[in-house]
Amino acid sequence: MEDVITENWPDRTWPGRHAPDDTPDEVTAEDHQDGPGEFLAGGGVLTLAAVPIGRAEDASARLVAELARATLIAAEDTRRVRWLASSLNIELKARVVSYYDAVEARRTAELLGELQAGQDILLVTDAGTPGISDPGYRLVTAAAAAGLRVTALPGPSAVTTALAVSGLPTDRFSFEGFPPRGPGQRARRFAELAEDRRTQVFFESGRRLAVTLAELAASHGADRPAVVCRELTKTHEEIKRGPLAQLAAWAAEVSGADPRENKRKKVSGAVRGEITLVVAGAARASRRLARDRGDAGVLGLPGDLDVPAGHALPPLPSR
């Protein structure tokens, strides 16, 4: 049986996390750092370790080694990191402490003290890279301001994985995290993004996917190309491509199934699993529609090109 990270882990759909105004203000770089590029003498090292987003066997050799040698691990879910270690046949020697949303502000001060005392810390989240819509931002900011060394153990990210498989332009993109929960905030944010020329990447809960897709279809246009990536890299991975309106109808059909049938099948009535949504940017969408129409005149408009230097436009499709 394959080692696949299953569902039933804490819902990571909190909105607006780790915005710039969350920066800890009790320390500054000037207070602790001796000079540019210098680190606090005797301080520990904070390592942000990316972990698999689906399959345990996607773990890098370096991650395996760091988990085995770590003496203090800060984990979004302590059960999750112990499961991962067990799946990789690692016997953890480290002290493992929780570092999730509800305790992040308080635990940051404690971990900063450990670093200042010379303790190295390995920071991991449930999946992917710490600090990307997951805990980590506050601790990284505080450690950097205190003149401590912060480094990374690179690896998986649902953002770049979804972008790569989407088939949408990848040279310029924005990561929007989870959309705001409040209707007014969502409407304003989607209206701003509707004119953004970059490809847009979102996280979303399966329970809210149908509503989000419908609202994006209203703000961005029903025909705007988009891709829903569900359970990336896992056994039941699914990638759905189409216009926003079509994807909204699909998600609504899944979410609106007969509740009695859902109960019999023991499903929630929502699109299940971890969701990453990729939406084409405004100019990209215009250019694709023009290509589909064979409209060379529209393609020739300078304001609608936005082609990376050194790249030629693809040929128009034959009619």
Image (cartoon, grey):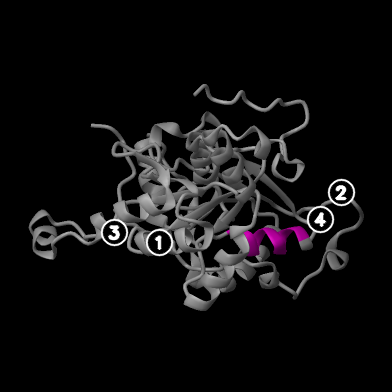
Q: Earlier in the sequence, mark 1 or mark 4?
A: 4
Q: Earlier in the sequence, mark 2 or mark 1?
A: 2
Tell me the mark number nearer the camera, choosing from 3 and 4.
3
Q: Earlier in the sequence, mark 3 or mark 4?
A: 4
- Could you say where residue 89 lies in the image, as x and y percent from the top left? 37, 34
Residue drawn at x 59%, y 38% as measured from the top left: 169
On residue 214, the disc is 1
- The type of residue carrying mark 3 is Ala
Distance between mark 3 and mark 2 Cα atoms: 52 Å
Q: Is residue 141 magenta?
A: yes
* Residues at circles 1 and 4 in contact by the CB criterion of under 8 Å: no
Q: Which residue is mark 3?
A: 252
* Residues at circles 1 and 3 in contact by the CB criterion of under 8 Å: yes
SS class of the residue under badge 2?
A: loop
SS class of the residue under badge 3?
A: helix
On residue 40, the disc is 4
Query: Magenta part of the protein: which range?
Result: 136-144
